[in-house]
Image: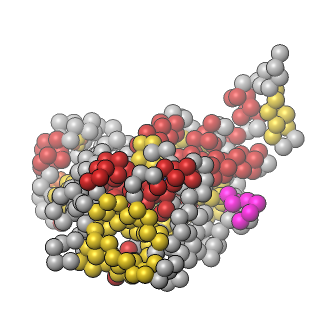
Amino acid sequence: MKVVWFKFENLYYDFRKHSAGGLMRSLKLDEKSVLVIGGGIAGLQVASDLARFGVKVYLVERLPSLGGHVSLLSSVFPTLTDANEILSQKISEVTSYSNVQLLTNAEIKEINGTFGNFKIKIVKKPRYVNEKKCVACGKCVEVCPVSIPKEYEMGLSRRKAIYMPPKAFPETYLIDENYCLRFKGNECKACVEVCPENAIDFSQTSIDVELKVDIIVLATGFDLFDARKIAQYGYGTYKNVITGLEYERLSHPEGPTNGKIVKISDGKEPKSVVFLLCVGSRDKKYHTYCCRIGCANALKHAYILKKQYGDNVDAYICYIDIRTVGKGLEEFYQEVRRSGITLIHGQPSEIRPLPNGSLNVEIFDPSTHKLLSVISDLVVLETAITPCTAVRKVLDLPLSQYGFFQEKNMKLNTVETPIKGVFLAGTSQAPKNITETIEHASMAALKIIETLIHL
Ligand SMILES: Cc1cc2nc3c(=O)[nH]c(=O)nc-3n(C[C@H](O)[C@H](O)[C@H](O)COP(=O)(O)OP(=O)(O)OC[C@H]3O[C@@H](n4cnc5c(N)ncnc54)[C@H](O)[C@@H]3O)c2cc1C
Ligand code: SF4
Ligand code: SF4
């Protein structure tokens, strides 16, 4: 008979004699609790890994949705898997555990205490829609008179003041205080009157939640570099200069054009698209580090464009170096090279509009010392990943030279911080792709289990 031993430090556990639940109880993991800040792919992974061991997990997300940046992506390199598929799997994993409590649309207000006894104050913001009553029928949306441009969709699509973001959790509507007429002193009652479930509730207020936890995990992710800072690229001035994240929305089957790539200026198909790498990264003026995803992202974007439109479109990638390290990425790079795209060595000095509405992209090639000029209909800026600053107001942690949270040891321990009981998961520590993020989060979970056993 096969003997199944599980070793944790000096403790051996014979799975023939005991159940997994017995393991948790003997290690007293079901008496331990962890706060995970951030509901992106890292937070979801660390929460489900910990929950599997019986640990009580509180996952706090500032937005009314889960999934972080991945909730906006179309398909992901190198496998071109549907991002929604990956995320749905992770969300259903987390929500299957009764020992995970999810608090979305919530903000961390205060963190006090130390390892084994952290005291947390959280404010859960009102949705003005009763989550238990709303059946997501969307009738309120039809009557709401407020229409604003949807975030990241370049003015090509709009949403109402009452809305449901991608991967909303719970899957119900909510009212955006910033735009709802009632918060501007108007007596609008359109959504109240039409809702068949009587779910609209303007009497809702913020709810204070207090928790005591043993350990905190920062899975707060990243922000994106503001491309407006590089004025010569014209982002924010020229409509047909967009960011990589905006291109993701354009190529998304549920995006503003249902996956059709168009010029933002007139909705027509572009004949030529240029992708620029290292926008704000590997640049002494902005961020000197490599964002680790820009190259693979541009390759993915150009490849899908060529697959979709073939010879009807020219795809150019302007690069300093192409960096595609990781399983499957070199193979992906080679395949993209064979797909008919053009790689140009050099970074544009300037993007200028032409009288016919196209854009002139001027590129200096440092190896040949030649100035090239590419006429393009759409320019995509693959912007740098930058440190997320949202949680810093309440938690004073050392930062690395690039502004990400400082790990305990860059080589030997990238999941603990110099503060005992505070852990890192995913891109809060440094730029990472999805695979690396998930691996890092699982590594954090294991280290946390080990730490909790000794508490
Ligand atoms: C345009 C683009 C395309 C990409 N394409 C790919 C791809 O094809 N393949 C691939 O492998 N990777 C891709 N990536 C990288 C991928 O998005 C990241 O690896 C992944 O999002 C990292 O997950 P995360 O959880 O660490 O961070 P995030 O996705 O940033 O999630 C962090 C979460 O924490 C929340 N948060 C932050 N602060 C607080 C706070 N104080 N309180 C509560 N919540 C907070 C945020 O709201 C967010 O939900 C792409 C990235 C971009 C920008
Ligand atoms: S009308 Fe009411 S039940 Fe229907 S989506 Fe709106 S709030 Fe929810
Ligand atoms: S009350 Fe606000 S959310 Fe409701 S219909 Fe009016 S503007 Fe829209």
Q: Is residue 426 above or below residue 363?
A: above
How many callouts does the rendering have? 0
Residue 147 x, y percent position in the rendering: 16, 58
Q: Is residue 98 above or below residue 356?
A: above
The answer to whether 319 appears left or right of 114 in the picture is left
Residue closer to the observer: 342 or 379: 342
Residue 14 x, y percent position in the rendering: 82, 26
**What residue occupies the far right of the structure in this picture?**
10
Q: Where on the picture, by quarter, is residue 323?
A: bottom right
Residue 210 x, y percent position in the rendering: 53, 54
The answer to whether 29 appears left or right of 136 in the picture is right
Tell me which segment is drawn in magenta. 410-417
Q: Where on the picture, by quarter, is residue 151?
A: bottom left
* Magenta residues, dominant SS class: loop
Magenta stretch holds residue 414: yes
Residue 442 x, y percent position in the rendering: 64, 47
Residue closer to the observer: 116 or 77: 77
Question: Which residue lies at the image location 53% right of the left edge and 75% below the top edge?
Answer: 282
- Check the image and tell me how it is coloured: secondary structure
The answer to whether 61 appears left or right of 214 in the picture is left
Q: Does any portion of residue 434 appear in the rendered image?
A: no
Question: Which residue lies at the image location 28% right of the left edge and 68% below the top edge?
Answer: 376
